[in-house]
Amino acid sequence: MLKLQGDPILLRDFVPRNRESFVSLEGDEAMFTYMKFRIDRDSGESVRLQRLLQEPDLDPRPSYNLVIEDAEGFCGWAGIDSILGTDSGQFGWYLRSDRWGRGYATEATRLLLDFSFSLLRRATMWATADPDNLASLRVLEKSGLTSQGLTSPVYTWRGTRPRVLFTIETEHWRTQLRPPEPSEG
């Protein structure tokens, strides 16, 4: 099982006991404000969750969708998708609204970038955010990503919306943002 330990969160693979926490997200209206899609109980259980549970067994693994967990339990999920035919990846996170403002998105971003550049050997990582989602825009900026401007509008559950594209190159991460290696004492 993949585990990426942060402070104060843990990112790990989905397991069957996450079923109820995952499908209960359908009732968190605030969480879906800026998301491209919505979760409802039927599609959450039958399609999306099944994919998340099967993903760790795939070889090669095209994506990494991971539970975000704190001391109180399930907070949401974060993910990395490979861009087929490239050495790039896309990442993002979805947090329950009662966990906003605690630094979890920033820590999830740090963990995902570290994993992507160090272990997956990605050359570039990118993320998008709704231009009205000021909190996500701020997380991406303070995490070292650079805005590339607006993308073409994408279809979302609430209609066609623009997105802001952010990117970061491995060299920038390595020289400016990479966590220090633990010292041996």
Image (tube, helix red, strand yellow):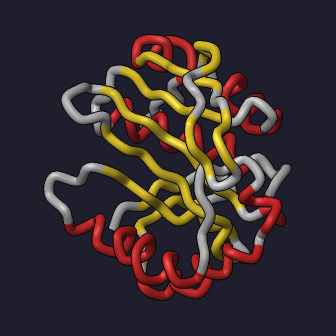
The answer to which of 181 and 24 lies nearer the viewer is 24
Q: Residue at x 62, y 63 (%)?
A: 38
Please provide percent x and percent y for residue 158: 70, 52
Residue 182 at least partly seen: no
User: What residue is drawn where x is 70% and y is 23%?
Assistant: 141
Along the line of sight, which residue is nearer the eye, 92 or 155? 155
Q: Quadrant of residue 80?
A: top left
What is the total number of numbered labels drawn onto the structure image? Answer: 0
Q: Position of residue 81 (x, y in %)?
A: 37, 44
Q: Quadrant of residue 82?
A: top left
Compared to 34, does 98 lie above or below? below
Name the quadrant of the N terminus: bottom left
- Image-based side of 44 in relation to 71, left or right: left
Residue extending farthest to the front is 159
Q: Is residue 48 above or below residue 66?
A: below
Could one spot residue 114 in this view of the protein? yes
Where residue 41 appears, as percent x and y from the top left, is 58, 83
Q: Residue at x 37, y 34 (%)?
A: 89
Residue at 47% across, 54% down: 4
Residue 9 percent across, percent down from the top left? 63, 59
| Viewer-side residue, 44 vs 181 | 44
Q: Tell me if residue 171 comes above or below residue 123 in the rendering.
A: above
Q: Is residue 58 above or below residue 26?
A: above
With 50 as the anchor, is 141 left or right in this view?
Answer: right
